[in-house]
Amino acid sequence: MSAGEPVVPASELAAVRAEISMLQRILGKKTLENEILKVAVEYSVAKKWIARSPLQSGDGQ
């Protein structure tokens, strides 16, 4: 650390690290959910339970 750099209290650093860990866990869960839903859509299209993938390009989104 060089002179003039701000000093952050250890408690604040610990709180920020805990928040980062929590957000990383949430991101991991959401990523997994997204992958599961992609597989479910692909399976449903293959079984003709739905006519097409709802995220195909050209559907106005």
Image: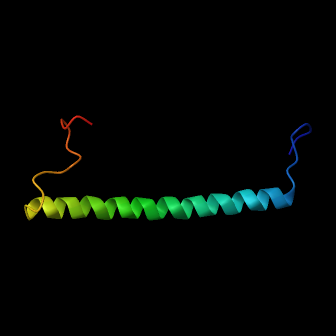
**Quadrant of the image for the C terminus?**
top left
Count of marks placed on residues: 0
Residue 43: quarter of image: bottom left
Residue 5: quarter of image: top right
* Position of 42 relative to 61 (above/below): below
The x, y position of residue 45, in whole percent, is 12, 58
Return the residue nearer the eye: 3 or 43: 43
Return the residue nearer the eye: 51 or 30: 51
The x, y position of residue 48, in whole percent, is 7, 61
Q: Residue at 69% across / 63% down in the picture?
A: 18
Q: Residue at 75% across / 60% down in the picture?
A: 15
Q: Residue at 61% across / 63% down in the picture?
A: 22
The x, y position of residue 3, in whole percent, is 92, 39
* Position of 51 relative to 4 (above/below): below
The x, y position of residue 14, in whole percent, is 77, 62
Residue at the farthest left position: 48
Residue at the farthest right position: 3
Coloring scheme used? rainbow
Q: Residue at 21% across / 59% down in the picture?
A: 41
Return the residue nearer the eye: 33 or 9: 33
Return the residue nearer the eye: 17 or 40: 40
